[in-house]
Image: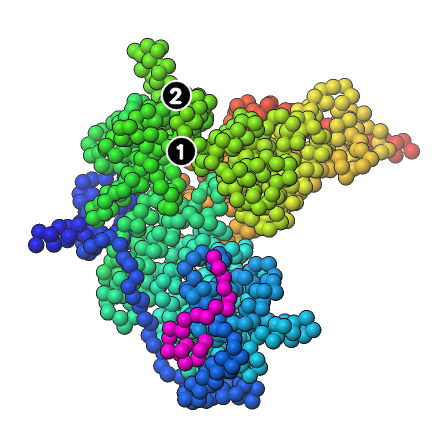
């Protein structure tokens, strides 16, 4: 009895569900949370908890959906006109038909099809010995009667489809082996239909294929069996029409043309890992089909979807009778493509999963069995929405808010059920992984600011309320979720303890510095490495490095990687308010005043070189994150080469990086983060920078090719970043530098698209180029004769060329002459680059509007939604874009962008969220952007245009403060970039002076003409 009582106590509270739990983690964990609230949360968990023996659920059965009523016999005209035999035969005739088909096959001596089990391995991976024609064991009664296999023992349907359709055109051996298979499995029949069409279209070159395919009599019998399974000839032609699309986008378009049920294997094929779906609308259409066909709750929907012909409709009704494991497989594949294309669509997928879990309640199975299936799918979805697989690498704004919203939808659904679903250990880990990637909330920021300057960083009371709080009330959301996991009966492993340390609580109960760290559930965390990361600077990290959790433990690559990361980190800017743990910066701490110099030197962290030599002496070779950190921060290309050659990377990989003729296949094997780190070193190397940058571009093109790759932005960013350096250091002229930038823009856009990150980098690149030219222009203007020789002044005074030739104006006001070849002048190229960037801005805005139209209503905060948009709406990006427009002389465009910002940031709920914050986030602070407009655009625009901007500000609810003259002057004085901003202001003052002089000359000329007319 005691043992049973202990089991009940361990299982109590294991169910964590619904918005109540969400509120506990996000809202209830506030600074002033009381003990009664914490006790209420535990009572809630105990109320919904159920006995859980082992903490995990396993598939032992699947829920069966309602069986459709028997259908009436339907004779299809195309099949009853004599072209096929025995289409309407009774059951005994159909059995005889199958026996005849098997006998025909045996007389021909054709071996049975080579088949394989359900596709449990990764798609597209060929078996170790793909025998196409070996006999497969006939396990089922139907197989033994017919002599043809329906199971797959060596080759899966997905492998067959990818071999014949997804990859390069198949060779003759693959085609011949496919033609030799004798099966009435639908994928095989469709592939043989394709081969038959090709052979009949070109008989001279395909006689061998035609001989290997089933004979005409056999084919008619196979078509009859397909008809009996619910697939008429027009259905098979439509399935083949889908599969034979030129690419995956075309296949998906054909798939969605008809709102009918399709076999599951086609949807699985479209969602395979290597699928090249690239349009968000296409993915949304597939999600809608998945939701409509897998979550139908009414009998009318199901009855209407059943084909009227045939007696066997298993294949046609497969989408309505999805087994739980099949649904989970499709869910996982949809989630991979959502993370790859648009992570915000995960909330749509979560709605579908929630509806599917509710849909299981109508099953006639035993309630315990139904509950088991629901819990299994529930926990599988929690893990899926926490995965980072297929996520575009190095997102500056990883959409963790939408990951959490997807999990919250499932928790909310569970809370609405009569019996809340149980969360297993893997489900708790998935929830903690998502919470660890969320930004700090107000309570966590308050705790981070109270850390003492010593180690351990105990919390100092900030006000009277802090002194009354219990220690556990200051824990982060992730740590509290771990406590709930323990209360549910699950013990913590090394990964859990390491995650607790990264989230602010060491294993011995002392505080640590909370880190905003993305967690990969498939990677192992180490407690020692986590303790090194959870520090404020290199000195504290070195102290943790020298004190392992267990006596005698030796550091490994992860510990060295964490230490190298601290050594390479920059010092935090005291003028910028930032919280330790939000970024990789070194924050100052209080130094002990009574320590001797010897003791201070002993506590001081070693240099990178010293630590690297120590690592080599201990027999540790750089690999993984350690190698990436070393290469990306290498002081020279030679140092990066040394790191690569002394690492665990295979020789053929690093030798290909160093070679002048790299092997694309070897480059593709290099981990993407290490390859990108090497590209960054090549692009910023100061020795022969032009040669190194060209080499880096060739490496990227050799690895990526012309196929669309979402990782292209990750690799091209360092190239665009370093392309903006001085043209003399690259050994080219300004015109050639602009030409190269435009060429790269076109090249990347044609092959891979131009996402927001590259737009931002391209705007900064062009701004850097023009910034230096403005300094040169100002020097020309200050000289006696240089003012009329620099055509760049026409950027800011486009009407200067309209001066009448007959007026003979003042030479100082004469517009500068252009070169004979105007297409290659810096002025023309600057205008061309400006036009391209403006077009990119409009394209990003239109694309984001389309994405917003596909996203359904969710509970993600409006601020998080704004910061995760794919258009230039955040303050850092739009500020750089406005500065570029100012240096390019696009003042009217600046006014249009400011109006657009007011409209986007003027939403009522967003304004309320910003007003509730103690401090406006950096990404939402538009003061600098408004200062750019006032400093550069406002003096150059007509008064009517400026008034329209001010009127838009007054109408909008955005509540921005219009900067006064003192703020604008402070911006020009305090935000200098090599004096370029102030120089641009002086150039624009000179342009306005020239414009006033031209108007004065024009008025004087008109007055003289009037006087002459009066004299006559």
Left or right of residue 830: residue 12? left
Q: Position of residue 966 (x, y in %)?
A: 52, 25
Q: Position of residue 438 (x, y in %)?
A: 37, 42
**Disc 2 residue crowd, few under 14, some 14–19, many 20+, Cα 10 Å:** many
Which residue is at a point 55% across and 45% down the rendered structure image? 668
Left or right of residue 907: residue 45? left
Principal secondary structure, stretch drawn in magenta = loop
Q: Name the disc covering residue 991, or none.
A: none
Locate the C terminus and report the quarter of the image it occupies.
Answer: top right
Which residue is at a point 68% across and 71% down the rendered structure image? 205
Which residue corresponds to mark 1?
557
Q: Position of residue 225 (x, y in %)?
A: 47, 80
Which residue is at a point 59% across and 32% down the rendered structure image? 682
The answer to which of 661 and 360 lies nearer the viewer is 661
Left or right of residue 618: residue 785? right
Position of 738 relative to 269 (above/below): above
Which residue corresponds to mark 2?
605
Question: Is residue 135 inside the magenta stretch?
Answer: yes
Q: CA distance from mark 2 to mark 1?
A: 18 Å
Q: Quadrant of residue 878?
A: top right
Q: Which residues are magenta?
A: 128-148
Q: Position of residue 129 (x, y in %)?
A: 48, 59
Question: Is residue 652 inside the magenta stretch?
Answer: no
């Amino acid at each position: 009895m005691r043992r049973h009582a202990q089991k009940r106590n361990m299982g109590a509270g294991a169910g964590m569900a619904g918005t109540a739990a969400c509120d506990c983690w996000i809202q209830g964990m506030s600074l002033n949370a009381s003990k009664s609230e914490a006790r209420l949360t535990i009572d809630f968990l105990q109320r919904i908890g159920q006995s859980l023996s082992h903490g995990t659920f396993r598939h032992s059965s699947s829920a069966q959906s309602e069986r459709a009523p028997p259908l009436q016999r339907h004779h299809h005209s195309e099949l009853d006109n004599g072209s096929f035999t025995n289409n309407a035969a009774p059951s005994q005739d159909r059995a005889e038909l199958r026996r005849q088909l098997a006998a025909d096959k045996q007389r021909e001596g054709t071996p049975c099809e080579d088949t394989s089990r359900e596709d449990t391995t990764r798609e597209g991976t060929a078996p170790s010995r793909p025998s196409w024609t070996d006999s497969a064991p006939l396990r089922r009664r139907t197989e033994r009667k017919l002599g043809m296999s329906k199971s797959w023992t060596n080759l899966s349907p997905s492998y067959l489809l990818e071999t014949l359709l997804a990859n390069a055109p198949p060779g003759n051996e693959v085609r011949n082996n496919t033609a030799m298979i004798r099966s009435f499995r639908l994928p095989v029949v469709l592939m043989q239909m394709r081969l038959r069409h090709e052979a009949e279209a070109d008989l001279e070159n395909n006689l061998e294929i035609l001989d290997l395919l089933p004979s005409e009599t056999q084919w008619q019998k196979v078509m009859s069996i397909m008809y009996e399974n619910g697939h008429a000839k027009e259905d098979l032609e439509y399935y083949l029409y889908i599969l034979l699309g030129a690419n995956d986008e075309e296949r998906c378009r054909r798939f969605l043309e008809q709102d009918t049920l399709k076999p599951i294997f086609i949807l699985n094929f479209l969602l395979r890992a290597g699928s090249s779906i690239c349009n968000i609308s296409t993915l949304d259409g597939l999600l809608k089909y998945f939701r409509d066909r897998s979550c139908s709750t009414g009998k009318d929907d199901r009855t209407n979807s059943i084909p009227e012909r045939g007696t066997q409709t298993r294949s046609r009704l497969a989408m309505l009778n999805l087994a739980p494991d099949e649904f989970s497989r499709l869910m996982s594949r949809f989630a991979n493509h959502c993370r790859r294309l648009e992570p915000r669509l995960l909330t749509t997928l979560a709605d579908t999963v929630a509806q599917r879990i509710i849909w299981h309640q109508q099953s006639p199975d035993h309630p315990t069995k139904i509950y088991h299936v629901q819990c299994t799918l529930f926990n599988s979805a929690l893990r899926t929405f926490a995965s980072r697989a297929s996520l575009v690498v190095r997102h500056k704004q990883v959409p963790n808010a939408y990951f959490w919203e997807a999990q919250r939808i499932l928790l909310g659904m569970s809370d609405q059920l009569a019996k809340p679903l149980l969360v297993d250990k893997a489900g708790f880990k998935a929830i903690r992984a998502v919470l660890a990637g969320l930004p700090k909330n107000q309570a966590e920021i308050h705790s981070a600011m109270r850390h003492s300057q010593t180690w351990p960083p105990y919390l100092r009371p900030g006000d009277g309320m802090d002194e009354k709080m219990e220690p556990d009330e200051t824990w982060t959301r992730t740590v509290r979720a771990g406590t709930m996991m323990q209360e549910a009966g699950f013990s913590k492993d090394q990964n859990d303890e390491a995650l607790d340390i990264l989230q602010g609580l060491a294993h011995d109960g002392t505080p640590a510095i909370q880190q905003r760290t993305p967690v990969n559930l498939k990677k192992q965390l180490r407690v020692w490495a986590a303790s090194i990361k959870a520090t404020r600077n290199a000195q504290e990290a070195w102290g943790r490095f020298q004190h392992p959790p267990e006596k005698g433990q030796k550091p490994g690559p992860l510990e060295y990687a964490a230490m190298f990361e601290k050594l390479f980190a920059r010092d935090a800017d005291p003028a910028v308010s930032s919280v330790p743990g939000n970024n990789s910066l070194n924050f100052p701490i209080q130094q002990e005043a009574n320590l001797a110099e010897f003791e201070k030197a002993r506590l001081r962290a070693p240099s990178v070189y010293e630590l690297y030599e120590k690592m080599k002496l201990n027999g540790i070779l750089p690999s993984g994150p350690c190698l990436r950190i070393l290469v990306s921060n290498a002081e020279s290309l030679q140092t990066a080469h040394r790191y690569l050659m002394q690492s665990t990377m295979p020789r053929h990989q690093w030798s290909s990086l160093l070679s002048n003729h790299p092997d694309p296949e070897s480059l593709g094997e290099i981990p993407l983060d290490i390859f990108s780190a090497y590209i960054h070193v090549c692009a910023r190397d100061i020795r022969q920078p032009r040669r190194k940058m060209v080499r880096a571009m060739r490496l990227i093109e050799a690895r990526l090719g012309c196929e669309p790759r979402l990782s292209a932005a990750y690799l091209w960013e360092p190239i665009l970043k370093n392309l903006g350096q001085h043209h003399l250091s690259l050994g080219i002229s300004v015109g050639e530098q602009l030409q190269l930038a435009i060429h790269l823009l076109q090249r990347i856009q044609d092959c891979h698209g131009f996402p927001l990150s590259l737009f931002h980098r391209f705007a900064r690149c062009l701004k850097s180029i023009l910034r230096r030219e403005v300094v040169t222009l100002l020097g020309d203007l200050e000289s006696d004769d240089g003012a009329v020789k620099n055509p760049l002044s026409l950027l800011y005074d486009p009407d200067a060329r309209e001066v009448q030739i007959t007026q003979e104006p003042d030479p100082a006001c004469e517009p500068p002459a252009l070169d004979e070849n105007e297409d290659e002048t810096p002025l023309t190229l600057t205008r061309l680059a400006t036009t391209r960037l403006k077009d990119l801005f409009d394209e990003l805005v239109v694309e984001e509007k389309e994405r917003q139209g596909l996203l359904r209503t969710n509970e993600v905060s409006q601020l998080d939604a704004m910061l995760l948009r794919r258009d230039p709406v955040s303050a850092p990006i739009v500020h750089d874009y406005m500065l570029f427009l100012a240096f390019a002389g696009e003042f009217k465009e600046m006014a249009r962008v400011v109006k657009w910002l007011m409209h986007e940031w003027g939403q009522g709920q967003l304004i309320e969220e910003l007003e509730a914050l103690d401090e406006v986030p950096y990404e939402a602070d538009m003061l600098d952007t408004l200062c750019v407009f006032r400093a550069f655009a406002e003096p150059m625009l007509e008064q009517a245009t400026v008034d329209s901007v001010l009127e838009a500000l007054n109408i909008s609810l955005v509540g921005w403060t219009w900067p006064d003259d003192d703020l604008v002057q402070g911006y020009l004085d305090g935000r200098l970039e090599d004096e370029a901003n102030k120089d641009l202001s002086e150039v624009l003052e000179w342009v306005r002076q020239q414009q006033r002089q031209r108007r004065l000359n024009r008025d004087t000329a008109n007055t003289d003409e009037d006087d002459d007319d009066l004299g006559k």
